[in-house]
Image: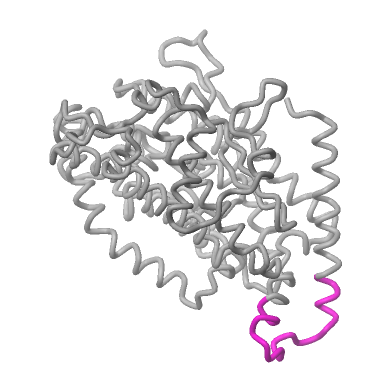
Amino acid sequence: MQNSGNLTYELNAQQTYSEFQHEIWDLLNKQGNLNNIPDTQTYRQIRYYSVIGPAALSPEELDRYNRLINDMLSIYNAASVCALNEHFHCGLRLQPDLTKIMANSRNWEELQHVWTEWRRNSGQKMKDTYDQMVKISNKAARLNNFTDTADYWSFPFESPALTVDLEDAWEEVKPLYELLHAYVRRRLREYYGPERVSRQAPLPAHILGNMWAQSWENIFHITQPYPGKTFLDVTPEMERQGYSSIDMFRLAEDFFVSLNMSALPLDFWQGSIFEEPLDRVVLCQPSAWDFCNRRDFRIKMCTNVNMKDLITAHHETAHIHYFMQYKNQPKVFRDGANPAFHEAIGEAIGLSVSTPRHLQALGLVQPSVDDTAVDINYLYSMALEKVAFLPFAYVMDKWRYDVFKGEIGKDQYNCHWWRLSEQYQGIKPPVLRSEIDFDPGAKYHIPANIPYLR
């Protein structure tokens, strides 16, 4: 449980920041038309300071907005299900129980049960609340001089044709995704039988190794192109060489120094959290922090010695280097060039680090692993993780943009979700759905009202 003193401090800090935002906003609104500022950099700074999101609401409405989101997150965080055919074995939570079942079980009925029950106990219970939140979120957007929340979320990308840009990007990726989809369908037909996996219908969403079918990496072992040809996992070699979490971040530092970046400052090593503390509970989602004083940059990550965390360590360190490069810019210009920019750099670094050649250079892979079958297996595993994710991420915000714009009403929420999921992901629910259900709400970012596009 979070320390109550820390929580009070955090809430007070958030309140102070909201009040500061509101005062700046009031001040700028009194200046009249700001579009006449000739200097583009000054205009951009003022434009960003004049966008404060939900903080533009009255205190009562802001409180209601936050309560609606907290109510949905309470449902989400409290949701649990009972095990299949074991009515006394209940209380299975999303993390770690249901996630492990979706990743490891190959029992069709068990996967279908868990998939359905999770949605019944999470999303289905928050549909009315979500609809209320949409209305007040749109009101906040209008107070910030946007037409709706979709317009407000699009603003930081600074593209007048963002929806066209996204569709064009998707059309470029789509041929590769369709090849991956067709191959996975064939292997799943072989595994589950043609009576369960059709040659033509969309793939059943519950057998792809993930609660939301957003990543398919967990079905690698039953679909791999070359069984027995182990693809690269340097975890055993890292363990054999006695790697620690600090060693992994030192490797990341060396990687960036080799690109002619600066070494990380002493404050970074003293202030960061690299392992789960023994004296308190922390949220272990890996994250990088800029404390905005031009010298204090930190990472918080409960690192395990494995290949996945080695790549994540490089990804998070990429954020730190971005912060360091931009530390002398005005505050507005210290963020990413757009919301996706930081992640794009971090992912590019992660892909570079995980190549066989680089891992050989680190002494974590034997040079003899230069084998086409091993390479194909490795590239295929990356496709299951990265390529399969793209249409899911696209649908997440495409659905919400349609909702925020009023093109889809509450009476079509669920139908539209599955229409888009079939169109872009080529997946279908394992059981019949209706408007009693609210399947979008079964994914955290929907009740939390956090954009996903980046």
Residue drawn 50% across the image and 60% down it? 340
The picture places residue 171, in percent across and down from the top left corner, at 29, 64
In front of the other: 45 or 109: 45
Residue 32 is a magenta residue: yes
In front of the other: 220 or 67: 220
Residue drawn 66% across the image and 62% down it? 327
Residue drawn 36% across the image and 48% down it? 351
In front of the other: 75 or 373: 373
Classify residue 403 by image quadrant. Answer: bottom right
**Residue 163 visible within the image:** yes
Q: How many marks?
A: 0
201 shown above or below 228: below
In front of the other: 92 or 126: 92
The picture places residue 103, in percent across and down from the top left corner, at 37, 27
Classify residue 33 by image quadrant. Answer: bottom right
Q: State the scheme by which the image is colored.
A: one colour
Residue drawn 46% across the image and 76% down it? 161
**Residue 436 visible within the image:** no
The picture places residue 165, in percent across and down from the top left corner, at 40, 71
Q: Which residues are magenta?
A: 25-44
Question: Is residue 408 left or right of 264 when viewed as pictured?
Answer: left
152 shown above or below 270: below
Residue 156 is a magenta residue: no
Question: Is residue 368 left or right of 235 when viewed as pictured?
Answer: left
Question: Is residue 181 left or right of 100 when viewed as pictured?
Answer: left
218 shown above or below 180: above
The picture places residue 128, in percent across and down from the top left corner, at 63, 45
Q: Quadrant of the N terminus?
A: top right
